């Protein structure tokens, strides 16, 4: 045991494990869920409709449909936008929920590799793919990987009549704390046909599990509502039992009421991590300190990853690998996606969530700085 580890174990505050994620559920959320259950409103749909309305009002969207999973949201989104010859274009690090939905519908999927030292393809490379490979009626999923902001060339997609689905899970609440960056902040949801936001336990707000599908289009909203179980279901069409439960929506309402503070705290912790990592051999690929939201915080370590994992385990700090890149699900050659592979094999996500205490943030920072 080195001197640093001896120092940690000698301090009482370092004795407790730091969980990778811990959802903040206040007394209000628990009471709201209990009220919903006691008043027998589990399937009334009134609480879900209230949540949908509040979500749109709080974050400046037009129409919203709360659903039971992110996969359900992608399934309905692709179904509403797909044409006979549509290909779906996905960033290689995007959510596996999108790939699952593509395969449910039997659509063709094409993956876009990230650039070196980035969570995204270079803008030049993406523009080249749009011009030379994408065709009219294709669908592109614009995902803000790990909560990093990226200037997607939305106008280029629209000029070529390519439908856009924007995954705002990692960037949720972006507008609230970026008022001064109006040009960037107002672009969220403006150009895309559909926006999807995950509501899982490690997302920015949570309903336990679920997602919300958002759109500015009355046509898309009506079409999707008609093929979901609920009051507005069209009985002449095949429908899907995808709606979010009322007791989950009750939790979401209270999460929304504090989204500003949740996002602010997340950004503050992320920026502290950035400052700490600057003087180490390790790397992070967040490019914009003001605009990034830090949904996850992967660090590329220049050491054997198993050794690094054992190191954090010895200090009782839970870390995780990044989600599996999509090319691995499709069994494509790893050599075709070298940058994604390097990120997957060399990086770990450290804890980052609003409930993380300042002392534990400092403990994680000290741990990173003392990796030898």
Image (spheres, rainbow, N blue to C red):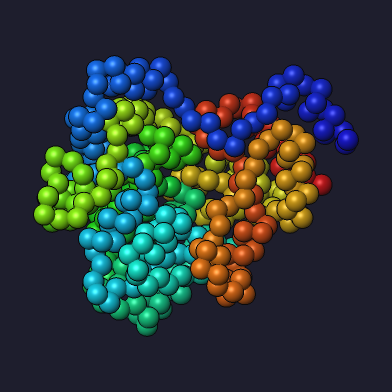
Identity of the residue drawn at 88% across and 35% down: 1
Q: In the rendered view, does 26 fall on the left or right side of 4? A: left
Res 100 visible: yes
Q: In the rendering, at what x and y percent does residue 107 appear?
A: 34, 70
Identity of the residue drawn at 28% across and 48% down: 213
Viewer-proximal residue, 176 or 247? 247
Q: In the rendering, at what x and y percent does residue 152 appear?
A: 37, 63
Relative height, residue 168 to residue 37 (above, below): below
Viewer-proximal residue, 279 or 189? 189
Q: In the rendering, at what x and y percent does residue 114 appear?
A: 52, 67
Quadrant of residue 12 in the image?
top right
Relative height, residue 341 to residue 185 (above, below): below
Q: In the rendered view, does 11 fall on the left or right side of 327? A: right
Viewer-proximal residue, 304 or 364? 304
Q: In the rendered view, does 159 fall on the left or right side of 285? A: left
Q: In the rendered view, does 135 fall on the left or right side of 321? A: left
Q: In the rendering, at what x and y percent does residue 57 appear?
A: 22, 37
């Amino acid at each position: 045991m080195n001197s640093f580890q001896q120092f940690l174990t000698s301090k009482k505050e370092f004795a407790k494990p730091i969980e990778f994620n811990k959802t903040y559920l206040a007394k209000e959320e628990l009471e709201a869920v209990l009220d919903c259950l006691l008043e027998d409103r589990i399937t009334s749909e009134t609480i879900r409709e209230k949540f949908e309305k509040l979500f749109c009002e709080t974050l400046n969207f037009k129409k919203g449909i709360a659903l039971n999973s992110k996969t359900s949201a992608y399934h309905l989104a692709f179904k509403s936008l797909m044409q006979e010859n549509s290909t779906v274009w996905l960033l290689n690090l995007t959510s596996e929920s999108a790939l699952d939905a593509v395969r449910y519908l039997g659509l063709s999927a094409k993956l876009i590799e990230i650039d070196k030292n980035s969570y995204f393809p270079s803008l030049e490379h993406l523009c080249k793919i749009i011009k030379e490979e994408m065709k009219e009626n294709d669908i592109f999923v614009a995902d803000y990987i790990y909560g990093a902001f990226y200037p997607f060339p939305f106008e280029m997609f629209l000029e070529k009549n390519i439908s856009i689905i924007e995954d705002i899970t990692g960037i949720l609440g972006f507008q609230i704390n970026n008022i001064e960056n109006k040009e960037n902040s107002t672009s969220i949801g403006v150009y895309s046909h559909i926006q999807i936001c995950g509501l899982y336990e490690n997302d920015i707000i949570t309903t336990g599990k679920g997602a919300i599908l958002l759109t500015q289009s009355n046509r898309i909203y009506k079409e999707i509502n008609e093929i979901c179980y609920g009051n507005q279901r069209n009985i002449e069409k095949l429908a899907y039992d995808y709606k979010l439960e009322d007791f989950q929506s009750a939790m979401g309402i209270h999460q929304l009421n504090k989204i500003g503070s949740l996002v602010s705290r997340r950004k503050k912790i992320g920026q502290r991590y950035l400052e700490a990592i600057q003087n180490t051999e390790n790397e992070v690929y967040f490019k914009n300190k003001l605009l990034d939201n830090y949904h996850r915080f992967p660090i590329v370590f220049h050491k054997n990853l198993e050794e690094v994992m054992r190191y954090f385990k010895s200090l009782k700090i839970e870390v995780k690998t990044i989600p599996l890149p999509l090319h691995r699900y499709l069994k494509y050659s790893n050599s075709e996606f070298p940058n994604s592979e390097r990120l997957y094999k060399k990086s770990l996500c450290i804890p980052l969530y609003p409930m993380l205490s300042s002392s534990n943030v400092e403990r994680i920072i000290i741990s990173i700085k003392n990796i030898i």
